[in-house]
Image (tube, coloured by chain):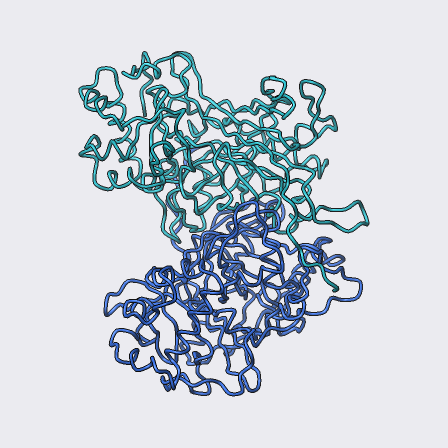
Chain colours: A blue, B cyan
């Protein structure tokens, strides 16, 4: 465990030492970037202050010497999967080296500062998806979300009987993961008709967002070999923010009996910077106490250390900005403030459960939390919950929203903060809704 | 369309001309193989008679010259994804060239026959998964399966109201796809207790198989760009047999509200030879007529040519062989004979629906049918259906099965056959159940 430092360490990059810096020396998140002006290929980088340290360049100049050839190679890949595969010992060693290279009084700093190609201004970089995700799993780990949604369909029994025993999850679609900033095209699909009327194919009229966090798996496990809960946390590399865009009309009509499919797999946005579990270490807290009468986790999900500090204290927020607000110069409106600590299951429990039947995880697999709603009324992480009372969300300028409209931008953000500790940003995950495309040419013929 | 030949073409490889040959000249399925004795790396091959033509060697010796450098490169990859990406024009050209190379009266045959490394005996080869599947989707396309299963849970309304409108599907787990012959370890998981009792973690007691076919997507579509139904069939490369192993107790407890997860993602077996849609061309038939009162497919799923011959007439069978039967020298018992033509939706409809919201498919993505049950009582494609009447399956020697036991082997097979046409085998997908592993070391501590 990292000891809590008395004062935040300082970097020779002045912008990293600003009080409101998104990327102080204690942070060091990883991402994949390219520099369009330099026509550079996508490569791993680490954010510091107002810039990105190019890990491929750092490796090329020998600044990561002694950390192993696997790491050296991983820093030249166009995705972080290879770094994720190396495991916590190597991750720690790399973090220590980077901290040293970027520290105010480092003997290595001079060597780094001399390299003209080692840094790219954040403002010049194009960010890519941090990893090539093959397995993307979406959980349902917020009991508040499950209760709020369940109440809409089953007022007398909002929670399914399995909820407090099983970390509920399902497989999402990896191919349609997109990086923050990419537009989200309003999907078409089968829209249920009024009672007694047939469905029709057309643009969704009930487009929603979902505020989520998503954990990247590090070293994988072999098929048939579950990861015990005691070792599960150490296999998580880091976390991003994720927007699980949802077309509620398509979802409602299609989801029985096999779960969500086209209602969700048209796009899933991911923030570009992976915040490492090491950076989050000072912000680990116990999971919420179980209510009286609730069952203890089954032994395969129960670990004393995980119960002591398996959750993460991170504020998560959602802002919305409509096209009209943007045109009028109005700032994005805060519509949800939740916290990752509200989840019923810890990240380690999600990973242990996922492998408990022998299912194999691969480096770079993504385990998303599901909508992170909290107990408070202003901590509801999707419009389905926010407008569930029947009153649409009111926006500045007289607009209102039951569902997202074309031009609406949704901005997820998050941070960890505590007196005496540097603020760790969880980054931003943005996406604006684009109009549905013309419907595909169908060959309508006599049947 | 391929004209129906008067007599099957003959190969200079005598074994391909045998009446009961699995791999005649009209077949030419693709797979990925290696030769352990030669320590060769996995590479694409095509099956003919009793051997495999090594496509990497064929390309290396210039036998595929003139078909394009992309194809040449694709034949040297350790998976078929690159070949699948090339699309139907290249697939046809390759098939025509291979047919020529292997035909009795080919001018090129002599050149091929002289190459010592071009062929590997089937008996010596180790088969691998044909593609690196990133997106694996499992549909629910047999209305007979949906009704048989639905009747168990909702006797008054076996089919959900959406069934006849929406090709129901969900995302499966790609990482746990395994090739035919690999053992299937009985999974552990949360097993529901008797009414009023808590669940417990342990080996599944309700292990089942599911008889399925699975289609490989060829060229992908860009995110946001649906594939129209008229072009969907041409984007399918070929088909394998798939066993969607299912732990019914885990599935029953976990599946609400988000669908199957750990009850299925512990292992999914795939046959090694991909049968091309071109080889199946003579066996295309109309989909089953819709019952009176059933809705026509919505326009985005309706294409005249697809309605005319979008289904596939292929017999599918399931055999079972218990450990005791094997020890006694008893032959595998036929327990299901179904047909791919019974599906409610055609392969083109599955693909068009999958992309109808803009979801992007990638070359090598797998679209499985779901259990292919037919209308007849002996055409039930899983034990859940077979034993649903309450009477377990009787095996030779006095054994019986409500669910699979350790040591049981399940063998899926299939073929197309019609007078005057060569028999096209759909191959075999085998898997035997291995005992559950010792449960993972859990750190049971006070809660």
| Residue sitting farthest toward the front | A66
Q: Residue A48, how many percent across, how many down?
A: 39, 78
Q: Quadrant of residue B228?
A: top left
Q: Quadrant of residue A417?
A: bottom right
Observer-nearest residue: A433 or A225? A225
Asked if residue B108 lies left or right of residue B395, the reply is: left
Q: Residue B180, how many percent across, how many down?
A: 49, 32
Res. A409 visible in picture: no
Above/below status of A442 relative to B119: below
| Residue sitting farthest toward the right | B196
Above/below status of B215 relative to A76: above
Observer-nearest residue: B367 or A167? A167
Above/below status of A197 relative to A210: above
Quarter of the image with the C terminus of chain B in it: bottom right
Q: Residue B292, how many percent across, how many down?
A: 58, 29
Asked if residue B407 lies left or right of residue A447, the reply is: right
Observer-nearest residue: A416 or A325? A416
Q: Residue at x 30, y 31 (%)?
A: B54
Quarter of the image with the N terminus of chain B in it: top left
Observer-nearest residue: B346 or B25? B25
Q: Residue A276, how many percent across, how many down?
A: 48, 69
Res. B374 visible in picture: yes
Q: Residue at x 23, y 34 (%)?
A: B59
Above/below status of B334 relative to A170: above
Q: How many marks?
A: 0
């Amino acid at each position: 465990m990292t000891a809590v430092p008395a004062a935040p360490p300082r970097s020779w990059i002045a912008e990293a030492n600003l009080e409101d810096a998104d990327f102080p020396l204690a942070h060091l998140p990883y991402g994949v970037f390219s520099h369009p002006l330099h026509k550079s290929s996508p490569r791993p980088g680490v954010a510091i202050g107002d810039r990105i340290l190019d890990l491929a360049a750092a490796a090329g100049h020998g600044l990561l010497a002694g950390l192993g050839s696997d790491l050296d190679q991983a820093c030249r890949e166009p995705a972080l999967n290879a770094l994720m595969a190396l495991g916590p010992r190597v991750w720690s060693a790399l973090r220590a080296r980077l901290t040293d290279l970027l520290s105010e009084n480092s003997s290595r700093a001079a060597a780094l500062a001399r390299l003209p190609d080692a840094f790219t201004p954040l403002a010049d970089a194009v960010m890519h998806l941090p990893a090539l995700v093959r397995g993307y799993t979406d959980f349902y780990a917020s009991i508040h979300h499950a209760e709020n949604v369940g109440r809409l369909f089953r007022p007398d029994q909002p929670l399914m009987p399995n909820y407090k025993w099983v970390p509920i999850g399902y497989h999402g679609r990896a191919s349609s993961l997109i990086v923050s900033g990419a537009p989200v095209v309003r999907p078409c699909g089968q829209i249920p008709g009024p009672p007694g009327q047939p469905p029709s194919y057309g643009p969704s009229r009930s487009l929603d967002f979902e505020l989520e966090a998503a954990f990247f798996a590090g070293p994988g496990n072999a098929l048939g070999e579950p990861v015990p809960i005691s070792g599960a946390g150490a296999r998580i590399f880091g976390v991003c923010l994720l927007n699980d865009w949802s077309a509620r009309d398509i979802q409602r009509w299609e989801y029985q009996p096999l779960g969500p499919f086209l209602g969700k797999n048209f796009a899933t946005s991911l923030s570009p910077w992976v915040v490492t579990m090491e950076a989050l270490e000072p912000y680990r807290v116990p999971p919420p106490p179980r209510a009286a009468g609730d069952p203890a986790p089954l032994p395969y999900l129960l670990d004393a250390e995980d119960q002591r500090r398996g959750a993460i204290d991170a504020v998560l927020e959602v802002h919305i900005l409509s096209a009209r607000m943007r045109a009028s110069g109005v700032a994005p409106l805060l519509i949800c403030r939740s916290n990752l600590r509200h989840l019923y299951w810890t990240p380690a429990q999600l990973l242990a459960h996922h492998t408990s039947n022998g299912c194999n995880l691969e480096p770079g697999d993504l385990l998303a939390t599901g909508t992170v709603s909290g107990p408070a009324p202003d901590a509801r992480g999707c419009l389905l919950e926010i407008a569930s009372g029947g009153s649409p969300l009111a926006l500045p300028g007289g607009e209102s929203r039951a569902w997202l409209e074309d031009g609406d931008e949704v901005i997820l953000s998050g941070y960890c903060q505590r007196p005496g500790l540097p603020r760790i940003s969880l980054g931003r995950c943005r996406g604006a809704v684009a109009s549905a495309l013309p419907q595909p040419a169908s060959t309508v013929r006599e049947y």
